[in-house]
Image: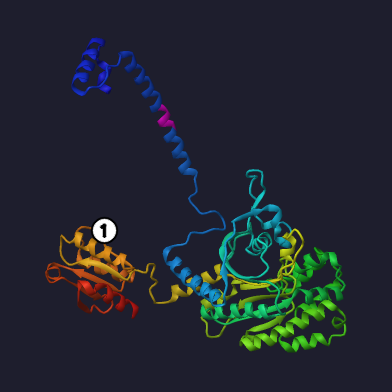
Amino acid sequence: MKNLKCLSSSCWTLFVIQRTIVYGTPVRSMSCHRRNQSTDRALLHQDTKLQEQVGQRKQSFALKTPKGTHDVHPHQMAIREKVFNTVVNCFKRHGAESIDTPVFELKELLTGKYGEDSKLIYDLEDQGGEHLSLRYDLTVPFARFLAMNKISKIKRYQIAKVYRRDNPAKGRYREFYQCDFDIAGHYDRMIPDAECLKIIHEILKELELGEFLIKMNDRRLLTGILTVCGVPDSRFRTVCTSIDKIDKIPWDNVRRELIEEKNLFPETVDQIGAYIRLNGGVDLIDRLYNDSKLSQNKWVMEGLGDLNLLYKYLELFGVADKVSVDLGLARGLDYYTGVIYEAVLVPSSQQNNHLQDMVHVGSVAGGGRYDDLVGMFDSKGRKVPCVGMSIGIERIFSIVEKKAMQSVEKIRTTETQVLVASAQKMFLEKRMRIISTLWNSGIKAEMLYKENPKFLTQLHYCEERGIPLMAIIGEEELKDDVVKLRVVSTRDEFIVSSENLIEEIKKLTSQR
């Protein structure tokens, strides 16, 4: 079109008439052409400006995931799926049903349930007249679910992402998965609680993370200790938040915080410290029973009574040796009312230095009893006692991934059972027919997306991806109506009739 600028009006008319005769396009005036030229120049100018703006944005735009989040690569996903399967199988083994809840809830529903951690809730802008927040955990939405649906008894599990506006750190994210198991309903004391601790024990043992310890306490026992030591009721929650840091920072730092920030008298703090640094088993429970100060407090006696009964049930479940009473365990969430617990990994002399570093990731499971939470949402205040536990799945992921990196075993990112291959050219259609038959029979199969792939390329693909079998066809196989099956690891080969191919693949892959 650039060459048309030199045409006179008469030449332009002649050109357009000829174009109309040849191509059947309508005649347009010269003035229309001139207007189009002006429009083209304007659009070209705008396009140049747009390209400059895009170029500037590309230079200033940081290509990264948001702070506190991360991408998960295929080999990591393969590891995570195995961990998830272990967790879910354990939950199902104990008779749990699965539910799901929205990723965001009404803001007022979440407010006031997490103590000082409420500041970490992600608030959303007003959407459609509702003030919403991203869920902080799965427990409060579960309590809302029970109250809203008038459910008074359920054993449920849920695996979903939660969001916390926390400072990201090693093993700590702003978006992460939680794996929760909860028992709701009126039952005899401590039986559901013992099962929750048994589940933690089973999962940590099956995942082979190393030595672990489940620490437990009772919020009533902690409340009684604070009362005996002279802490006012109005400061219980904030003091518990400080006490909950005792396994993360030295006692001297916690002591300073209680005195300088929580405004407690030094002698009160020293009395608290004498108790909350105690830990042990049944012998510690007996010792506290006989404490002249504590034995006068009803909250202490109720808590000790339940812990003593819980120990009896844990002995029957065969897990008591992995459980210890730790009076410094507080768990800062406001909704806990009774027994609380937390699992941590314990360094072992059999671990190398790298693995010993991995055990300092914090708790890998936790939970407790929350008997009043559902009643907060019920219009008539009806209570549904609940107890539950949550697996610290993100921290477990990081440990299992590091162990996998040290292992010589190859991580498979797919579950492909067989690659349909050809040793010669011109067999694409036959490969497609065979692989379609395998897919229709439920066999996980692949083929290379080339008409004539080299046989060595197909073999290397199997070895790199960990595919155990190759189904090979060629002229001889087609003539005899057979398929050659090759075991990739040993390079052993078998001739199988086409009609028995599916049965033979299933048999060979079931043995692996």
Q: Residue at x 28, y 67 (%)?
A: 438
Q: Residue at x 30, y 71 (%)?
A: 463
The quadrant in which the N terminus is found is top left
Query: Looking at the picture, how far across and down is residue 12, in whole percent?
Result: 24, 14
Q: Residue at x 56, y 83 (%)?
A: 348
Given residues 160 and 217, the one toward you in this image is 160
- Image height of 117 relative to 27, above or below: below
Q: Which residue is mark 1?
A: 449
- Mark 1 nearby-residue class (10 Å; few <14, some 14–19, many ≥20): few
Does 512 lie within the magenta span?
no
Question: Colour mode?
Answer: rainbow
- The answer to whether 176 appears left or right of 226 in the picture is left
Which of the 4 image quarters holds residue 471?
Answer: bottom left
- Image height of 127 relative to 157, above or below: above
Query: Looking at the picture, how far across and down is residue 47, in whole percent?
Result: 40, 31
Question: What's under tag 1, amino acid-wise?
Answer: Tyr
Q: Is residue 401 visible?
A: yes
- The answer to whether 466 appears left or right of 158 in the picture is left
Q: Which residues are magenta?
A: 45-49
Query: Looking at the picture, how far across and down is residue 135, in whole percent?
Result: 63, 58
Which of the 4 image quarters holds residue 178?
Answer: bottom right
User: How many numbered circles does the render carry?
Assistant: 1
- Farthest-out residue, top: 10
- The answer to whether 467 appears left or right of 339 in the picture is left
The quadrant in which the C terminus is found is bottom left
Query: Looking at the picture, how far across and down is residue 275, in whole percent?
Result: 79, 79
Given residues 353 and 212, the one toward you in this image is 212
SS category of the residue bearing label 1: loop
Which of the 4 image quarters holds residue 449?
Answer: bottom left
- Image height of 36 relative to 382, above or below: above
Most frequent secondary structure within the magenta stretch: helix
